[in-house]
Image (tube, grey):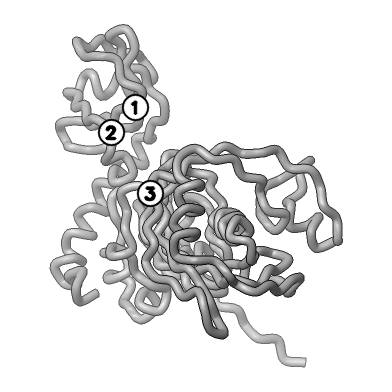
Amino acid sequence: MVQQSRIRVQRRPVHGVLLLDKPLGLSSNDALQKAKWLLRAEKAGHTGTLDPLATGVLPLCFGSATKFSQIHLDADKVYETEIALGVSTTTADAEGQVVQTRPVACSVGQVVEVLDQFMGVIDQVPPMHSALKKDGKALYEYARAGQEVERAVRRVTIHEMELLDMQLSGDAPFLRLRVACSKGTYIRTLGEDIAEALGCGGHLRLLRRVQTGIFTVAQTVSLAQLEAMSEEARLAQLLPVESLLAPFPRIELDAENAGRFLSGLRRRLELADAPQVAVFGQEPEALLGLAHIKGGELIATRLLTPVEISQNLAQTVTQWAARKAYPPDLA
């Protein structure tokens, strides 16, 4: 029997953030592994999963950027979703089996009234078909085994909800919504609860994340686009590690204080307390890490190593050249 030879990829240190437009039908981890292979990256992680049936913004962190991925897990999100009314499924989305069909008899006024009820702080029971863990086991594993387990209620916030389109009659009634929400919000559960409140039930047939934190879908690149690029053009798609820290105040340290900060020593500063600040060295200008200020002291939270700082600086030079050759609108 002839054995097929496997292509061995030579990994390399890659640092930064890739804003991927996750395709339909692919898990977040599969998308991450594909992008990691295309970039030949040594280390990678994502900032929170999207369901296989969801598409949209999925920030992927490479190298030292993985140290700050938790920040983006906590970021607010914006989704566009479509709720198919009158048909309830086992999973609250199009992947599940139909369990009930009901007529849709609600009015436009009732829709507006119900949507208002779900604004602000609300309680949700996480769906059984989710990656949330109980006793070390994902809920979807219990669901696949036909078991339903008790789930703690979660409190989330719906900041905005815009009705983009709707059809309340015909063969396929639906609501199309744009939802801005806090971390941990299950849009499938929100859609299912809204449809139940309308008295007809329903399920999600479309879900697209259009923004997470400061990153929008307009900034993303698809796996197909990435695959068609040269290696240099792929590298040019990466945002710098500090892009994850853009919402935080910036502190710059001279060479002496930067060295002491990197060794874990606290630095005295005449600045107000702050829960999170991005710390940079001045010469050369480079991200050093994340810190907080308390009682006039700068206290390190997450630090880059000297090797990571050196690699980030070298990669910046390489990316600058790559972006000149492959501008974002052509890459």
Give me the residue at 46% from left, 75% from top: 167
Mark 3 vs mark 2, CA separation in Å: 24 Å
Which one is in front, 112 or 295?
A: 112
Residue matched to label 3: 160
> Which one is in front in this view, the residue at disc 1 or the one at disc 3?
3
Task: Name the element at disc 3.
Answer: strand
Which one is in front, 276 or 269?
A: 276
x and y percentages locating residue 231 in the rendered image: 33, 72
Q: Amino acid at mark 1?
A: Gln
> Which one is in front in this view, the residue at disc 3 or the one at disc 2?
3
Q: Quadrant of the N terminus?
A: bottom right
Which one is in front, 1 or 30?
A: 30
Q: Which mark is residue 276?
A: 1
Q: In the image, is 318 to the left or to the right of 169?
A: left
Mark 1 vs mark 2, CA separation in Å: 6 Å
Question: Callout 2: few (<14), some (14-19), or many (20+) C-alpha neighbours within 10 Å?
Answer: some
Regarding residue 87, the answer to whether it shows in the image is: yes
Q: Quadrant of the C terminus?
A: bottom left
Q: Is residue 139 above or below residue 37?
A: above
Give me the residue at 38% from left, 35% from top: 305
Question: Callout 1: few (<14), some (14-19), or many (20+) C-alpha neighbours within 10 Å?
Answer: some
Q: Are marks 1 and 2 in contact (CB under 8 Å)?
A: yes
Mark 1 vs mark 3, CA separation in Å: 26 Å
Q: Is residue 163 above or below residue 132?
A: below
x and y percentages locating residue 170 in the rendered image: 53, 84
Task: Name the element at disc 2.
Answer: loop
Give me the residue at 47% from left, 41% from top: 157
Which one is in front, 57 or 320?
A: 57
Give me the residue at 43% from left, 59% from top: 79
Q: Amino acid at mark 3?
A: Glu
Residue matched to label 2: 248
